[in-house]
Image: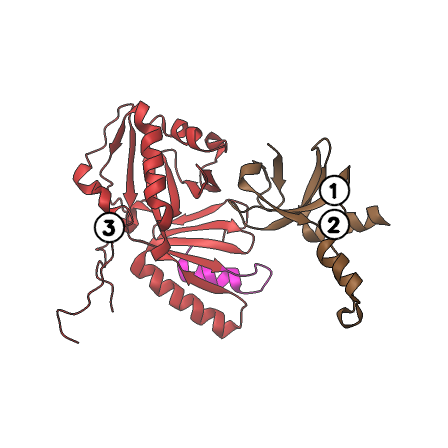
């Protein structure tokens, strides 16, 4: 194949908003601060917790304990593992690391003959961080869930303006909103519109190495999709 | 709006997050090869549609995406409870007996 041939590259579903150009350092004012965490890796993990070896294998490969309580989130410096259903979890990490994990997990499932699987859905999801003193109020405008009642280290799957989203609270500083790529444009505009009365600003997200999700921004992004 | 408790998420959630999935515990003919057309017709098309307590299925589409059983009053819309399909079936069969 010629060198100038087909070279697919990754594009965030929100690329057309040019958020990088708009981003500014976060300040402690009353505004809503928001930005997307682009190009993270997401994988759906399915399995039966009653099967011996399943939870152990997941923990051994990812270093994250399999959360068994409804809505619980396991976090570590390498990513997060969220409970989404009694037999389904979502792994979020850096894309490259996630690809390694899913390969190891699939090999492990096959070796131990576990009825479990991983499905990489990195292309289908994206994540936004929403913070500021009024960020819960913004969510209240859009959804029916009592967002202020989400405990730390938990996520809730609900609807914002008819679009299914997962709202994840890892620490006291803002929430992460996970939504589908196909709904990304809609959800982003929705958040932006709801935040408008309080002041909306796109913030620069720092790749903090001590944070389970911001740390995943640190490593260089493999923007070229290997053909 | 109904407020339905999802037995998997173990939380009361708004109806907006759920999708109705029809009457619960419709028994499929035990020996399908021997069932006549009338039996199949009843199985496929005939529903109880009661005025009163009704066992029905709901799916938590915006949450855990699981289907579960809800006992709801079709006149007052009161909800007696919600169970996983397996747990609910034991109660349902006891009621029917």
Q: Nearer the viewer, residue B1 or A68?
A: B1
Q: Nearer the viewer, residue A128 or A75?
A: A128
Q: Nearer the viewer, residue A167 or A188?
A: A188
**Residue depth check, mark 2 versus mark 1: number of the one nearer the observer:** 2
> Which of the chains is red?
A
Residue A46's x, y, as percent? Answer: 50, 60
- Dots 2, 3 in contact, CB < 8 A: no
Could you tell me which chain the residue with mark 1 belongs to? Answer: B
The residue at 31%/23% (across/down) is A198
| Residues tagged by mark 2 and mark 3 found on one chain of the structure | no
Could you tell me which chain the residue with mark 3 belongs to? Answer: A
Name the tint of chain B in the rendering: brown
- Dots 2, 1 in contact, CB < 8 A: no
Please state the extent of the stretch shown in magenta in the rendering. A46-64
Q: Nearer the viewer, residue A39 or B73?
A: B73
A63 within the magenta span:
yes
Which residue lies under the disc numbered 2?
Answer: B47
């Amino acid at each position: 194949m010629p060198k100038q041939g087909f070279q697919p590259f990754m594009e965030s579903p929100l690329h057309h908003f040019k958020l990088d150009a708009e981003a500014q350092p976060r300040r402690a004012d009353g505004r809503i601060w928001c930005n997307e965490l682009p190009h993270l890796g997401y994988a759906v993990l399915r399995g039966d917790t009653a099967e011996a070896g399943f939870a152990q294998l997941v923990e051994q490969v990812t270093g994250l304990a399999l959360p068994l309580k409804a809505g619980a989130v396991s976090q570590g410096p390498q990513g997060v593992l969220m409970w989404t259903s009694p037999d389904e979890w979502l792994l979020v990490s850096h894309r490259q690391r996630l690809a390694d994990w899913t390969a190891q997990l699939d090999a492990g499932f096959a070796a131990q003959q576990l009825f479990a699987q991983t499905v990489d859905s990195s292309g289908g999801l994206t994540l936004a961080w929403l913070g500021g003193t009024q960020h819960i109020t913004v969510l209240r405008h859009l959804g029916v869930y009592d967002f202020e009642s989400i405990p730390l280290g938990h996520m809730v799957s609900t609807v914002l303006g008819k679009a299914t989203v997962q709202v994840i609270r890892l620490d006291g500083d803002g929430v992460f909103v996970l939504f589908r790529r196909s709904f990304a444009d809609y959800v982003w505009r929705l958040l932006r519109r709801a935040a408008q009365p309080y002041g909306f600003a796109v913030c620069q997200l720092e790749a903090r190495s001590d944070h389970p999700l911001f740390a995943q921004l640190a490593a260089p992004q493999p923007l070229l999709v290997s053909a | 709006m109904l407020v339905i408790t999802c037995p998997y998420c173990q939380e009361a959630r708004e109806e907006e997050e759920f999708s109705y999935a029809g009457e619960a515990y419709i028994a499929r003919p035990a020996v399908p090869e021997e069932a006549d057309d009338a039996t199949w017709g009843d199985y496929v098309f005939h529903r109880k549609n009661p005025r009163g307590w009704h066992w029905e299925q709901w799916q938590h589409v915006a949450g855990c995406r699981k289907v579960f059983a809800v006992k709801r009053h079709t006149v007052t819309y009161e909800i007696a409870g919600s169970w996983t399909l397996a747990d609910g079936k034991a109660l349902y069969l006891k009621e029917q007996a």
